[in-house]
Amino acid sequence: MSNLFDLLVAGLATGAIYALVAVGFTLLWQTSQTINFAQGEFVMLPAFLMLAAMHVGAPFWLAVILGILLSMILLGLAFKLLLVDPMMRHGVLPLAIATMALAIGIKEAVKQFFSAEASPFPSIVPTGDVSILGHAVSLQSIGVLAVAILAVLGLTTLLNRTSLGHQMQAAAQNPTVARIIGVPVERMILLTFLINAFLVALASLLITPIYLAKFSSGEVLGQAAFIAAIVGGFNQVRGAIAGGLLIGVLDNLAAAYVSTQYRAAVPMMFLIAVILFRPQGLLGRAEERTV
Amino acid sequence: MSGFARPLKIALGLAVIAALIIVPMNFNRYGLFILSQWAVMSIAAMGLNLTLGYAGQVSLAQGAFVGIGAYAAAIMTTHGWPLPAAILVAIVLSFAIGWVLGYPALRVQHHYLAFVTLAFSTLAFLLFRNESWLTGGIYGISNIPRPHIFGIATNKPLPFYYVCLGSLAIVSLAVWWLIRSPWGRAFMALRENPLRAQSLGIDTRRYTLMAFAIGSALGGVAGALYAPLTQYIDPVPFNLSLSLDLLLMVIVGGAGFYFGPFLGAMIAVLLPEWLRFTEGYYLMLYAVAVMLLLIWSPTGILGILDRYLAERRTKAASALRAVAKSRLETVQ
């Protein structure tokens, strides 16, 4: 039993990080029909930006702030202006392919300019265990969960409770009508790109201490985020959150109870089942499909 | 492409074929390996172009079929079977699995389909890696023999390059015939407007499955040639990135254009090699080049040519109209 409890906590912690990445992924899809195949690399890069800032002598807290700001400029602003804007009107597929090329580019750039080896990364949460209900739970898991929950709460409050959030939703749901009633749609789309960049930088900060900073670590993360987004519902923020948590837990349980070799297969099977039997996702609403 | 005169087109085609036969004769081992790889990847990309470019079904699993073909060929030829038999098995196997993979396409489209096929790709990779009784697991299968064709041993790089080139030629002719047959037209109808295709009496279910199965079978052929080309296979080359690479080849070359996969495979296989003088930067430059190309022309390289020719035709047509109009006015 205690084993199961530990697995659940660890699963929820990684799941919360997947959720952050998946939320960003669905935001981009909703506002600009961007399927970002570089999302995993977007999570990998900020950690290296922070490491670079520390290399030139910045203390950790400053490096984190600089890393997040730089990520928002590079992965938010530059990504939108230089790649998405010129390609958006040409449909989903060419843009998706371009993000694949971007993923290769980011990976290679990190390998070339930083290191091909895995580097350790400081944790924002102190290491150690606390006892909850008689179980030893690592502070890291609790910290990760807390930060992720705060981020998600902040985002949902922004989206549902503020005028800015309502404008963003309007821009996502029906850009034409949104434009007519005076929503600055372009600015709202840019805002979602900045939010996505912030979320991936946060995810990077949370996950890198666990899995080390490595140029290739984006592949697994990106896939987990895709699966989380689809399973939860491509068009729903809360779906992506649920999907992320579910995939995190499922992944951990599969590693323990199925086999380490076929661990990656379990979320994939689940994904196939969801797509075939409930394509709109567990929490998503059915999108009208083009015939 | 109708902008070129027919004899010119034939002459150009013959020149390219002659160059592909003659020029590599004094290439070194590595150059021949890369060119053979280009031929093999062109076959796989041609298959994906049928599924995606002509029938409009997104697939992120072509790499898995190359893997299936490669393992089929590796396992059979190391057990003493001749390569043609292995290719046949690779075709049948990939066709059958591709057919089954097509079923989700009947239910979901676009990005959902992409993710189902992506999941399939990952599952196939896990099977290659974990079922070591069959695939050799992470150690792979080594000493894959190269075939004897008409009694000639193809162990050396040049003869085997001709095997790859010959296979590419056969597949190219078959695909050329296929897309001009009623089937090819049915595929395009499926891509352009499935509803109308159905109302015209095209069995869209069967053709969707067919598009997947035939495209996958070509992936299997490519794999069955890849195994004897490298003479050693392990699961790594057949992971998801191969599927993504093949998709990139099709889009960059020009999806739905007959010659797209050849060009796309050339870019994906040869461009990184040409950029090798930049050492560690070559893949980065390659990625930037692909992004710039797609920003410039989202329909790929042949999209540029197509636009240029279309523009020239409209210009020629309006010039003709202007002439006709002035004549009309002088008559009046």
Image: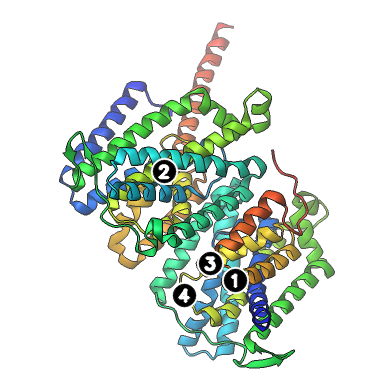
Q: Spatial distance from mark 4 to mark 1, Cα to Cα?
A: 28 Å
Q: Amino acid at mark 3?
A: Val
Q: In the rendered image, which quarter contains the C terminus of chain A? A: top right
Asked whether residue B196 appears in the rendered view, the answer is: yes
Kindly identify the amino acid type of the residue bearing the numbered disc 2. Answer: Gly
Number of numbered discs = 4
Residue matched to label 1: A257
Q: Amino acid at mark 1?
A: Tyr
Residue at 56% across / 50% down in the picture? B117
- Residues marked 1 and 2, same chain: no
What x and y, as percent, mark residue B252?
45, 46
Is B235 left or right of A290, judged from the image as shown? Answer: left
- In depth, the one of A253 and A279 nearer the eye is A253
Nearer to the camera, B324 or A15: A15
Give SS at disc 4. Answer: loop
Mark in the foreground, 4 or 1: 1
Res B173 quadrant in image: top left
Front label number (4 vs 2): 2
Task: Classify mark 3: helix, strand or loop.
Answer: helix
Q: Is residue B144 left or right of residue A126?
A: left
At x 52% / y 89%, what residue is drawn? Answer: A58
- The chain letter under disc 1 is A
Residue at 37% from the left image edge and 33% from the top image edge: B172
Mark positioned earlier in the residue sequence (3 or 4): 4
Residue A262 against residue B189 in the figure, above or below: below
Point out the tag, 1 or 3, that comes first from the N-terminus: 3
Give the mark nearer the N terminus: 4 vs 1.
4
* Real-space CA distance between mark 4 and mark 2, rounded to the nearest whole angstrom: 33 Å
| Residue matched to label 4 | A214
For the N terminus of chain A, the image quarter is bottom right
